[in-house]
Structures are given as C-alpha cells and as structure tokens.
Image (cartoon, rainbow, N blue to C red):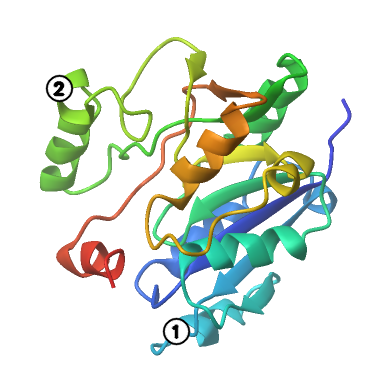
C-alpha cells in the first residue's frame, strides 16, 4: 500500500491542559511515521503550552496574529504534504484517524476536495460530557450539522468541521486560503468557497474528544 505524505496541522492557544494528550495521540497514529508530519501552530500562548510542545518531535510555528484562521494558513504554507489534515489542540485522535481519512480521499471521486467527520466523545469521558456529547450526536442536538451529528452512512455535505478533516492542499490555495478576518466559522467560509467548484465529502469513522469546559468555550470567543 502506498502512503502519501500528510501534514497534520494543529492550531492552538493556551492549551496547556490538553495539548500533551493531543500530541501523544497524533504520534501514535496507525500511519508510517516517515509519511506524516505534525505542525503545531501556537497563537502566542501565555501559559505553558509552548514549553510542553517543545518536549515532542513536532514542528512548532508561532502565529503572531493569534486567531485560528491565521494558524491554519501558516500551517498550510509551511506544510510539506500535498494532503493537509486539521484537528484542534483540545482533541484526541483515534489511532485509525489519519489512515481512514487518507483511504477515503484515495477512493473518492476526483472532484472531492475534503473528507472528514464530526467531533465525537469517548466512552471514557466523564458522565456529563458523555450525556452532552450523545445529545449532540442526534439530529435534534446537532441541527443536522456535520460538526457533531453521528451517522452510520458516508454522504456528501456542504461543509466539514476542521477539527476532523483532510484537504487537498492545492484546493485550499485555489480557494484563497482561510479568511483571517473570521474569529470563528473560518472553516465554514472556506468550505463555502470550495463548494462553488468542488465537493465536500463526509465520512463517519473517528471518535474525537472535544473539551467544552467553560474556559475552553470562552477561548473561542476572545
């Protein structure tokens, strides 16, 4: 089997509580180690995040603009792979995450620009987190959004959350990169522009822990 080289980009800021678990999960992916790289793009953290990141064999980039859109653009610009995967610093990747994304992309029609799935909870998460997570996986809880709606079938959608997605790098470039004016919703905006020419493909396969403590939620709205 051929394994295309993939760049995994993680945009972060003040993620000292979760970044080690995130990086360790990415280092343990069921994918050849010489066929992917991990780029951690830090938005000038004021806690111990960068100190923790520097313990691991990953590439650390500094994002002076601090927002997520700028972090993802910086990651894309410095990536070595023709495929770019995105996740967040408060997420934990399943060992099969990357290889599943790559296999889906390899077997997808040529006009598919991105493959991915929702952010789901682990069975080992705290009870409250599991209750909220399972509620969000329903149609009522997700509003039909690919962000958290669970499904047993692969299908096409208009957008995918960038905590769990793999893009063809040239597609991001052709679309003009992420719009750095967006503090939130920059993945939806990029996907909207991509969708004018290509297709976004949706696949359910990955369990991903997404932390929604009060502190983490506030970080998204700074």
Label 1: how many Cα within 10 Å (few below 14, some 14–19, many 20+)? some
Element type at marker 1? Answer: loop
Does the CB distance between marks 1 and 2 fall below 8 Å? no
Q: Give the x, y percent position of residue 179.
A: 54, 57
Residue 188 appears in the figure: yes
Q: Quadrant of the N terminus?
A: top right
Farthest right residue? Answer: 2
Q: Is residue 9 left or right of residue 34?
A: left
Q: Nearer the viewer, residue 192 or 37?
A: 192
- Residue at 46% from the left image edge and 22% from the top image edge: 204
- Residue at 64% from the left image edge and 74% from the top image edge: 56
Q: Quadrant of the C terminus?
A: bottom left
Q: Nearer the viewer, residue 58 or 95?
A: 58
Question: How many dots with numbers?
Answer: 2
Label 2: how many Cα within 10 Å (few below 14, some 14–19, many 20+)? few
Q: Can you tell which quarter of the image residue 13 is in?
A: bottom left
Question: Which badge, 1 or 2, is on the more N-terminal residue?
Answer: 1
Q: Give the x, y percent position of residue 206.
A: 47, 32
Q: Is residue 89 left or right of residue 107?
A: left
Q: Can you tell which quarter of the image residue 217 is in?
A: bottom left
Q: Nearer the viewer, residue 176 or 144?
A: 176
The disc at residue 45 is 1
Residue 20 appears in the figure: no
- Label 2 sits on residue: 140
């Amino acid at each position: 089997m051929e394994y295309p080289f993939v760049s995994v980009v993680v945009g972060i800021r003040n993620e000292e509580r979760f970044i080690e678990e995130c990086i360790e999960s990415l280092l343990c992916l069921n994918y050849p180690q010489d066929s992917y790289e991990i780029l951690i793009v830090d938005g000038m953290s004021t806690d111990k995040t960068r100190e923790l990141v520097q313990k691991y064999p990953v590439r650390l980039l500094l994002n002076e603009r601090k927002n997520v859109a700028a972090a993802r653009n910086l990651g894309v610009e410095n990536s070595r792979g023709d495929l770019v995967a995105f996740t967040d610093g408060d997420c934990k990747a399943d060992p099969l995450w990357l290889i599943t994304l790559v296999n889906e992309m390899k077997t997808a029609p040529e006009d598919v620009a991105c493959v991915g799935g929702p952010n789901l909870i682990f069975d080992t998460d705290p009870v409250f987190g599991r209750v909220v997570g399972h509620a969000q996986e329903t149609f009522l809880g997700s509003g039909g959004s690919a962000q958290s709606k669970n499904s047993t079938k692969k299908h096409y959608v208009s957008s995918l959350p960038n905590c769990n997605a793999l893009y063809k790098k040239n597609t991001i470039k052709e679309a003009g990169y992420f719009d750095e004016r967006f503090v939130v919703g920059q993945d939806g905006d990029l996907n909207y522009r991509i969708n004018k020419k290509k297709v976004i493909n949706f696949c359910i396969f990955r369990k991903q822990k997404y932390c929604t403590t009060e502190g983490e939620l506030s970080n998204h709205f700074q």
